[in-house]
Amino acid sequence: MQIPENKKLLSIVVPCFNEEEVISETFKRLNIFCQELKDLNFEIIFIDDGSKDKTRELLKKFAADDARVKVIFFARNFGHQIAVTAGIDAALGDAVVLIDADLQDPPEVVHQMIDKWRDGYDVVYGTRTERPGESAFKLATARSFYRLLNKLSDVPIPLDTGDFRLMSRSVVDTLRAMPERDRFVRGMVSWVGFKQTALPYKRAERFAGQSKYPLKKMLRFATDGVLSFSTKPLQMSVGVGMISAVIALMGIAYALFLRVFTSTWVEGWTALMIAVLFIGGVQLVCIGILGEYIGRIYNEIKNRPLYVVQEYVGFHENGPAISR
Ligand code: UDP
Ligand code: MG
């Protein structure tokens, strides 16, 4: 389809990982939403993050039926944040919307995002006022994570805000110039700056299927968030080291005092074990923190591509105009 010159282009980026149960409904809802866009052209970019179910075939069918649908097939599962990054890299739009494939982020809310974008905002991020259907554990951990992150991070990162957002071309271009490996996209967007605003919305329940964020991935994601946006854990380990050194000095002074000036002394095994285990524990934790940062340096330095694409479908000349 020929895109009229005068209309601006909206890119909708949808990361998908084993979403066969929801993806058809998502595509239907996105289509309804896009039909309502009177003065914008649109492209929908699905990223298949190494799905093992029927997601692949379904996405191929969508692309075959509609020239405005593009699909990036990853060679394996690279993770949600990398999938989003590939979408941002390939998007040609004047504005880019990131949206989950499970319909937890209602496409209809994007209309309000577009209005704010037209008012001159460069980033309109969705802030969750309610999250029905999530476990009490997820709600509690997410809540404390965003608050902790905000305390630690050098840039303010909005509370209770996921990746559901609209970004202008200027923000997208800046993000494309940020090659870091451990990607925490919502933090990176905050770091970029420009005019940003929140749009409160009610997060829906997952339409079907299971969450693709098991506890292990959630922990990894949270660690990435903290370590990519703060060096405070390092400063904290210096603090803990100092405190344990002071405790050690007091212990030494006490033990020496008893030995030199009194006729009793500190008994052997218990005191020894306390000292060894305490110092050992503190050291291991501090080395661990250091190790996490060094591991990240190691990953950066290898300079591998962020993701491997097995196939581009629906793009001109079999690939996006510009690729990383
Ligand atoms: N996702 C992905 N790769 C992954 C895990 C998730 O592309 O390794 C996608 C998933 O298909 C969905 C979005 O990321 O579109 C958010 O995942 P999910 O809904 O499972 O997370 P939750 O909402 O439970 O935090
Ligand atoms: Mg979800």
Image (spheres, rainbow, N blue to C red):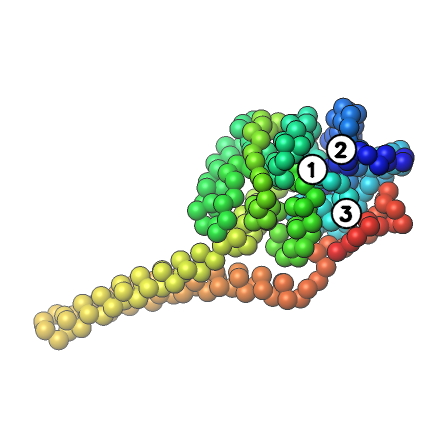
Quarter of the figure that contains the C terminus = bottom right
- Outermost residue to the left: 262
The amino acid type, in three-letter code, at marker 2 is: Ile
Residue carrying label 2:
23
Question: 16 and 18: which one is in front?
Answer: 16
Is 220 left or right of 247, judged from the image as shown? Answer: right
- How would you rate the neighbour count of disc 3 (Cα within 10 Å): few for under 14, some for 14-19, many for 20 or more? many
Residue carrying label 1:
97
Is 161 left or right of 306, judged from the image as shown? Answer: left
In the drawing, what numbered circle is on residue 177? Answer: none
Judged by depth in the image, the label closer to the viewer, 2 or 1, is: 1
- Quarter of the rendering containing residue 228: bottom right
Residue carrying label 3:
90
- How would you rate the neighbour count of disc 1 (Cα within 10 Å): few for under 14, some for 14-19, many for 20 or more? many
Q: Earlier in the sequence, mark 2 or mark 3?
A: 2
- Give the spatial CA distance, label 2 vs label 3: 20 Å
Q: Residue 140, percent across and down? A: 48, 36
